[in-house]
Image (cartoon, rainbow, N blue to C red):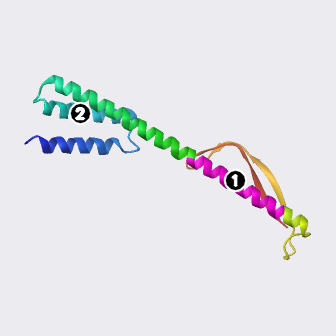
Amino acid sequence: MKHRIPTLFCMALALGASACQSTPEAATSALLGAAGAYIGSEIADGEPEGALLGAAAGVAAGVVVNHWQESAEKDAYLDGYDRGRNDEVKRLYWASKRLHNAELYGRGPSDGLERSYYEVPVPAHVAGDGVIIEGHRQVIEIVE
């Protein structure tokens, strides 16, 4: 009974620290392996076999946590990529629609301004926040 509170605290601390997104993969596996070794040693009353089995279980848990983090990152990236492409298609649709309306009704809205639309290629680049942006085409409206 006297070892349960430190053991539970150690397990909670290891899981909490390893689930952090900024923790490197090797550190996650090492932290959970060390926590598993400690817990295995406590459960087996100091026997080395218990520590060895606990360390192996901890490293396996670290690999599982790392896999979950990687798949969550990949899903978030793909979701953001899809949303960006959808927004680009919508912008192109509305720019085309405005251009078509301008052709149908003369010069465009009643404000007397002439609008021109140009499609400009944007090369692949890295944004200021580190996001890699693929090459695409952007429609620019020029109002004269």
Tell whether 82 sits left or right of 31.
right
Tell whether 127 sits left or right of 71.
right
Residue located farthest toward the left when viewing the structure as drawn: 2
Report the amino acid beneath label 2: Gly
Q: Is residue 49 visible?
A: yes
Name the residue at 25% across, 44% down.
13
* In the depicted structure, whether residue 31 falls above or below residue 137: above
* In the depicted structure, whether residue 61 falls above or below residue 93: above
The image quarter containing residue 1 is top left
Judging depth in this view, the residue of 37 and 120 nearest the camera is: 37
Image location (x, y in percent) of residue 76: 52, 46
Residue located farthest toward the top when viewing the structure as drawn: 49
Mark identifier at residue 88: 1
Where's the C terminus, which quadrant?
A: bottom right
Image location (x, y in percent) of residue 88: 69, 53
Whether residue 130 is in magenta: the answer is no
Report the amino acid beneath label 1: Glu
* In the depicted structure, whether residue 135 falls above or below residue 116: above
SS category of the residue bearing label 1: helix
Q: Which residue is mark 2?
A: 36
Name the residue at 61% across, 52% down.
83
Q: Is residue 115 visible?
A: no
Mark identifier at residue 65: none
Query: Range of the magenta residues?
Result: 79-99
Tell whether 124 sits left or right of 50.
right
The image quarter containing residue 44 is top left
